């Protein structure tokens, strides 16, 4: 529903209900016109998406916000609520309904963040006087600790990955980079040939918010990339010296789902126990193994491209957990 029409068209069609409808008129003639309500929510979505784009949020994040707000728009339309007529009690009832539907606390928290962003944008554009979501609470997220492969398991996985064919060479380079440079899946598939500087042994990574960082590339990842570029990629690429670094069988840029699918295959082949391994687990393993080796938390923050040190500090909790588990297994008085 959100974002289907242009802002100018919607402003003309809806007779500006966002700005001029107030709470007292929420059930007036215009408010009960389903088409006007849908248009108003679509206009709100267009404004938010434009703001998210200007802030440099990733397409995946913008799609998630649109999906979250589509659900709110459907709920509000069924209750004859324009965006300008929504009040804090309405939003609290909506969030309570999400809990009753069985959504996970993390999912509800993300949806609340999207709602706050939406009404914040409407306030900034002068379409509402104050955001009703400012005091909207969200459920406490669980103390999520990411899965981390042990160093031997990570080594066994990478040693099992590969082969003499182009796809095997590509996969080895792909997962050596994922683990050796701590890349997000989106960053991995976004790499171009020119982002890898073999002479300087560095990789230019375009992260969240279009932030660019330089990451050192270790020898195993560098050798795997050279093998792929020399013996694998030229057999697939139409332009061997330019374009995406990692290619599909048909020569297109890989997607994140391609990365997950190929990783699942190699995890099974390497017989890594403990369940599924996501591309993000390789990133978590990279950071945790750096911490194990004595790397400074600020340095890890820079290498991962985290905007806040608080995000990086999750790895100190991972390390604390591992220490406690080792104590429980090993100490006679534990």
Image (cartoon, rainbow, N blue to C red):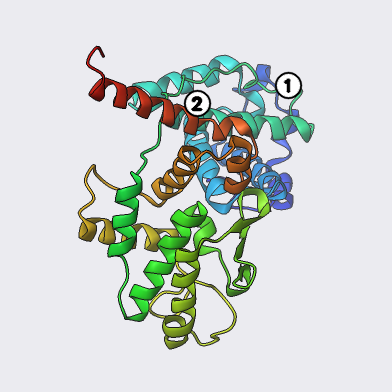
Residue 183 shows in this picture: no
Q: Residue furthest front?
A: 332
Please, is residue 117 above or below residue 11 in the view? above
Residue drawn at the location 36% of the way across and 29% of the way down: 322
Residue drawn at the location 41% of the way across and 22% of the way down: 97
Q: Which comes before the other along the chain, label 1 or label 2?
A: 2
Residue 193: give x, y in percent of width and height: 58, 74
- In depth, the one of 298 and 68 nearer the eye is 298
Residue 158: give x, y in percent of width and height: 34, 60
User: Badge 2: few (under 14), some or many (20 or more) residues near its Cα, within 10 Å?
Assistant: some
Badge 1 element = loop
Q: Disc number at residue 79?
A: 2
Q: Residue furthest top?
A: 333
Residue 67: give x, y in percent of width and height: 49, 43
Residue 175 horizontal side relative to residue 241, left or right? left
Which residue position is annotated with label 1?
130
Question: Closer to the observer: label 1 or label 2?
Answer: 1
Give the position of the C terminus as an image quadrant: top left
Determine contact: label 1, label 2, CB under 8 Å: no
- In depth, the one of 36 and 156 nearer the eye is 156
Residue drawn at the location 42% of the way across and 31% of the way down: 318
Residue 121 shows in this picture: yes
Badge 2 element = loop
């Amino acid at each position: 529903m959100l974002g289907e029409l242009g802002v100018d068209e919607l402003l003309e069609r809806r007779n500006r209900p966002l700005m001029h409808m107030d709470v007292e008129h929420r059930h007036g003639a215009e408010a009960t016109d389903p088409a006007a309500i849908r248009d108003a929510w679509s206009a709100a979505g267009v404004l938010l998406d434009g703001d998210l784009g200007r802030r440099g949020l990733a397409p995946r994040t913008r799609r998630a916000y649109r999906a979250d707000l589509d659900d709110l728009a459907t709920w509000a339309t069924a209750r004859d609520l324009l965006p300008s007529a929504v009040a804090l009690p309405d939003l609290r009832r909506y969030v309570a309904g999400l809990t009753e539907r069985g959504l996970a606390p993390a999912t509800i928290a993300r949806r609340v963040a999207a709602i706050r962003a939406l009404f914040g944008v409407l306030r900034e554009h002068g379409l509402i006087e104050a955001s009703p979501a400012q005091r909207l609470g969200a459920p406490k997220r669980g103390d999520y600790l990411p899965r981390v492969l042990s160093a031997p398991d990570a080594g066994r996985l990478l040693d099992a990955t590969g082969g003499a064919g182009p796809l095997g060479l590509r996969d080895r380079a792909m997962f050596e980079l994922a683990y050796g440079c701590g890349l997000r899946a989106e960053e991995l598939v976004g790499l171009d040939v020119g982002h890898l500087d073999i002479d300087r042994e560095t990789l230019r990574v375009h992260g969240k918010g279009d932030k660019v960082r330089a990451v050192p590339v270790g020898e195993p990842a560098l050798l795997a990339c050279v093998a792929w570029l020399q013996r694998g990629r030229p057999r697939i690429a139409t332009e061997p010296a330019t374009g995406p670094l990692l290619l599909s069988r048909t020569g297109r840029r890989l997607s994140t789902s391609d990365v997950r699918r190929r990783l699942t295959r190699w995890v099974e082949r390497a017989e890594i126990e403990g369940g599924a391994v996501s591309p993000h687990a390789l990133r978590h393993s990279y950071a945790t193994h750096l911490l194990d080796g004595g790397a400074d938390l600020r340095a890890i923050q820079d290498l991962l491209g985290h905007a806040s040190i608080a995000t990086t500090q999750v790895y100190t909790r991972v390390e604390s957990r591992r220490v406690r588990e080792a104590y429980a297994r090993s100490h006679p008085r534990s």
